[in-house]
């Protein structure tokens, strides 16, 4: 982010503002407990994201939990599985982010199995993608 006032940054901030307005409309008649409940039940739904992997991530617009989705990538001799985010979606405020917007939101590639063995049942077959 060399330029803080780049066109991308401006568009990103506009999206966040829109999402916050949408969130306010959705939640203005609800009590806080109901919003929390709504957030957790929505977060528990299977993701409709277009990518095979999804991990929870904090929504930069409304602060509730959304899902970053993307693909995984097995790295080198350490059998580390990296999650490479390509899309973020929040069901509470409707925010969706892609590519450079993910960078601005701080949603970055991460190691999924830092401390544990990869689960063979959850590993997608690379040959079929
Ligand atoms: Zn949100």
Image (cartoon, grey):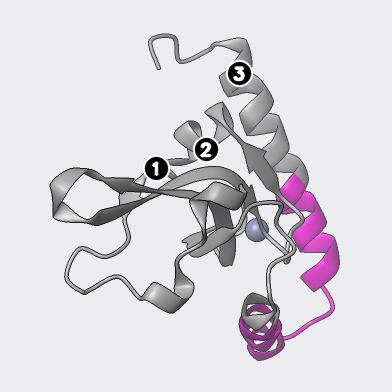
Depth check: 100 or 77 in front? Answer: 77
| Residue contact between numbered discs 1 and 2, judged by CB atoms under 8 Å | yes
Q: Is 88 on the left-hand or right-hand side of 34?
A: left
Q: Secondary structure at mark 1?
A: loop
Residue at x 46%, y 33% (from the top left corner): 103
Q: Secondary structure at mark 3?
A: helix
Q: Secondary structure at mark 2?
A: helix
Would residue 82 be visible to someone looking at this image? yes
Number of callouts: 3
Residue at x 54%, y 48% (from the top left corner): 127
Q: Is 96 on the left-hand or right-hand side of 83?
A: right
**Ligand 1: does it lie within 8 Å of the C-beta at label 1?**
no
Residue assigned mark 1: 108
Q: Is residue 28 magenta?
A: yes
Residue 2 is labelled as none
Q: Is 112 on the left-hand or right-hand side of 107?
A: left
Q: Earlier in the sequence, mark 1 or mark 2?
A: 2
Q: CA distance from mark 1 to mark 3?
A: 17 Å
Residue at x 45%, y 15% (from the top left corner): 4
Q: CA distance from mark 2 to mark 3?
A: 11 Å
In percent of width and height, residue 54 lies at 55, 62
In percent of width and height, residue 24 lies at 77, 61
Depth check: 62 or 110 in front? Answer: 110
Neighbourhood count class around disc 2 (C-alpha, 10 Å): few under 14, some 14–19, many 20 upward: many
Residue assigned mark 3: 8
Residue assigned mark 2: 102
**Ligand 1: does it lie within 8 Å of the C-beta at label 2?**
no
Q: Which residues are magenta?
A: 19-41
In percent of width and height, residue 72 lies at 44, 51
User: Within the displayed image, which quadrant is ligand 1 positioned in?
Assistant: bottom right
Q: Give the quadrant of the N terminus.
A: top left
């Amino acid at each position: 982010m060399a330029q803080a006032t780049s066109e991308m940054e401006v568009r990103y901030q506009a999206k966040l503002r829109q999402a916050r307005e949408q969130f306010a409309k959705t939640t203005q008649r609800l009590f806080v407990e109901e919003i929390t409940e709504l957030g957790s039940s929505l977060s528990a739904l299977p993701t409709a994201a277009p990518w095979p992997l999804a991990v929870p991530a904090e929504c930069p617009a409304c602060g509730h939990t959304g899902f970053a989705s993307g693909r995984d990538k097995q790295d080198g001799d350490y059998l580390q599985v990296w999650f490479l985010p390509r899309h973020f979606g929040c069901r509470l405020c409707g925010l969706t982010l892609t590519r450079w917007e993910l960078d601005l939101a701080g949603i970055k590639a991460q190691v999924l199995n830092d401390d544990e063995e990869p689960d063979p049942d959850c590993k997608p077959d690379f040959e079929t993608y």
